[in-house]
Amino acid sequence: MRLNPVLERLTPYRAGPPLEDIRRRYHLQRVSQLSANESPWGPFPEVVEAMTAALKGLNRYPDGACNEVRGLLADRLGVAEERFTFGNGSCELLMLLGEVFLGPGRHVVMPHPSFVIYRHIAQARAAEYTPVALPTLEYDLDAMLAAVRDDTTLLIVCNPNNPTGSHIAEADLRAFLQKVPPHVAVVLDEAYCEFVSPEKQVDSVRLLPDFPNLIILRTFSKIFGLAGLRVGYGIADPLLVQALDKVRQPFNVDSLAQVAAAASLRLPERIAERQRLVAAERARMEARLEDMGIACHPSEANFVLFDVTKLGIPGPEVAQALLEKGVMTRSGYAMECPGWIRVTIGEAAENDLFLDAVAGLRAVQDVPSHQIDDLSAEALSPES
Ligand SMILES: Cc1ncc(COP(=O)(O)O)c(C=O)c1O
């Protein structure tokens, strides 16, 4: 057998172990999963009802054009229907963009640290990539522009950025887009845009008419609480949508995912309520951490990156120590962001568990070392 040689550069995604295994291993009552930037809340009851009603139609293939969701989004955002494309999560759209824009002899610019899939799509297509550092964890847009080359075909911006929570203001984004050469497609990954404070919201859709090289990616996995269903969407120039349509599977978004996404879009006030709840909890977590003398990087997303270098134990062991107390977080050491840990904003009780666990570490001066074994290495590694 002759495997494609690009596979040598790739490592398979390692999903975390079942929470039940962690609970048993560390003799815990419960485990709070604050590691994957998911919503702590499931689909709304109306959404579950709509999906239940749709079960009996599962003998049919889904609507390959996602027409209902498309129409609702077009109305809501005031964007023509032909500007939308849908994916099996926005991750699928990222992979398809890799297929459309990347290959040997092509180059992509991306932020660093950021979402791990960006690097993966470059490696999978044997394209070159330049990770542009976020000094002080904030974007350096000039450095991103400077990284653009003649062979650059794609540039990715994640706003707010995962894992730093850093946010680019609308005026800065517009000024940046004006300077990106038109031969470069710009992906604006807005997986967390619904969590941004109302006064800082970027109306990125308004940028589309001025920048035909812009593609906005959004997802139902985060604030909509539908990560398990896998549905995301892109908004772009119809030419770009057609290019993506050429490479996607005809039925890439399943029927139940479409029903759930449509039903969720009909509940905008409930989504806004979630935004307020997450923002309030984020502020409370940041304040408690700061009170403990632990710095947080300002975040506009449903997660916070906090400094672990001043805790009583070595930084790389902190995520393990928290895991042993029943809180799964995402270690910055696994995301090439050493000295920091990312914690997702959960429900108040889960956040309290996390804050108490951190306070416990803070209090202990002489802590035994926290061995990272196979199970916890997996638990600490999920990438999202
Ligand atoms: C920045 C970013 N983009 C995209 C995604 C993927 O979202 P989806 O579940 O829609 O594939 C994630 C998931 O964590 C993310 O952090």
Image (cartoon, grey):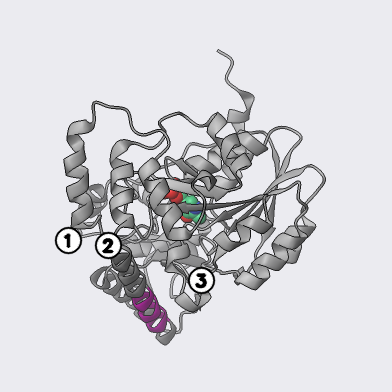
Q: Position of residue 285 (x, y in %)?
A: 37, 77
Circle 3: element type: loop
Q: Quadrant of the N terminus?
A: top right
The answer to whether the beta carbon of the residue marked 3 is less than 8 Å from any atom of ligand 1 is no
Judging depth in this view, the residue of 311 and 211 nearest the camera is: 211
Q: CA distance from mark 2 to mark 3?
A: 34 Å
Q: Position of residue 107 (x, y in %)?
A: 73, 43
User: Residue 44 — which label?
Assistant: none
Q: Residues within 10 Å of mark 2 (few under 14, many from 20)?
A: many
Q: Which residue is mark 1?
A: 29
232 sits left or right of 264 in the view? right
Crowd around label 3: few <14 · some 14–19 · many ≥20 (10 Å): some
Q: Of circles 2 and 3, which is in front? A: 3
The magenta stretch is 279-289
Q: Is residue 280 highlighted in magenta?
A: yes
Report the Cα–Cα distance between label 1 and label 2. Answer: 8 Å
**Callout 3, which amino acid?**
Gln
The percent coordinates of residue 83 (x first, y second) are: 54, 47
Q: Can residue 364 be seen here?
A: no
Q: Tell me: 120 left or right of 25.
A: right
Left or right for 57, reference 235: left
Q: Which residue is mark 3?
A: 201
Image: 247 above or below 154: above
Which mark sits nearer the N-terminus, 3 or 1? 1
Furthest-top residue in this view: 1
Q: Residue at x 43, y 75 (%)?
A: 312
Residue 115 visible in the snapshot: yes
In the image, what residue occupies the spot 42% across and 53% down?
73
Residue underneath mark 2: 326
Q: Which of labels 3 and 1 is toward the front?
A: 3
Q: Is residue 38 above or below residue 361?
A: above
